[in-house]
Amino acid sequence: MRRRLFLRTRARNGPLRLAVALAMLAATVLLGGSAAGAAQAPQAADGCYTWDEELSQGASGDAVTQLQIRVGGYPASGEVLAVDGEFGPATEAAVERFQSAYGLSKTGVADTETYEQIYQLQDDDCSPAHFDFAELNSCNSDWSGGAVGAEEAKSNALRTMWKLEALRHALGDEPITVTSGFRSTGCNDSVGGAPDSRHLYGDAADLVSDNHTLCELAQAARDRGFHGILGPGYPGHDDHAHVDHRSSQYWDAPDCGI
Ligand code: ZN
């Protein structure tokens, strides 16, 4: 296991980081605390999750799992990044792609700069900035009544949202709307969903956008970690692009050349 201590890596101070450090120091002095103590204690980045060390190849555990969820939209084209808590070559490559996408130093190591970018994208409930759980919950339910338990359905929706955030960023950060996400069995029946729909698992999303054609959405989804893509030309999919996490790849959007 190769892990580097997070706090030793904070030396690369750009002007912004220096300003932040000075502001933190000022706040600490105002509060009557010890500046040294404040510098050593990992500061909670938000209400969701805070990494306290760098992660690189060979690392494992929940911190890696949390990282994999956030960089899940940056796999090799056509691939799906495993969320298994093991930081291997695929995770390293995904971290590199994430870093490139946001103009960070391309190190393949989840470092301070990488975490700060994730924190910028991450809301307190762990959803990415431009998607939320309510949007992924078509029936306004408690996530129960689908093909998996409520906790798993919600967890699947979270993974989907981070991939959608990557999709949105890849397409120029223009808004993408989810018109349908998790469905309970009753909800799925009421909208005429397929009996084995991935919407029952919480890992599917139907997408539209005022800024992109459905084919642009479907084509871009191929690089964002979606095993299932259905779009224009596939029965029932001429008014949205559908993405999901079925176990093996099935892409069908004939009008888009997919
Ligand atoms: Zn769908």
Image (spheres, helix red, strand yellow):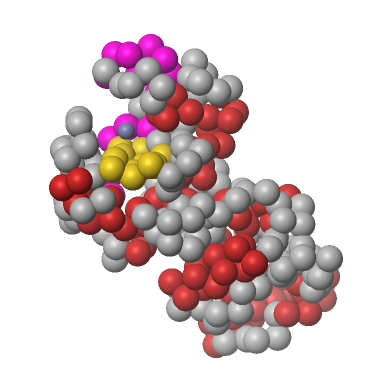
Evaluate whether residue 43 shows in this view.
no
- In the image, 108: left or right of 239? right
Magenta-drawn segment: 176-191
Residue in the foreground of this view, choosing between 186 and 216: 216
Q: Is residue 182 above or below residue 185?
A: below
Residue in the foreground of this view, choosing between 132 and 230: 230
Give the residue at x 46% y 37%: 246
Quarter of the figure that contains the N terminus? bottom right
Ligand 1 visible in quadrant: top left
Q: Is residue 182 above or below residue 118?
A: above
Residue in the foreground of this view, choosing between 47 and 234: 234
Residue 187 lies in the magenta stretch: yes
Residue 235 lies in the magenta stretch: no
- In the image, 140: left or right of 209? right
Give the residue at x 36% y 38%: 205
- In the image, 203: left or right of 41? left
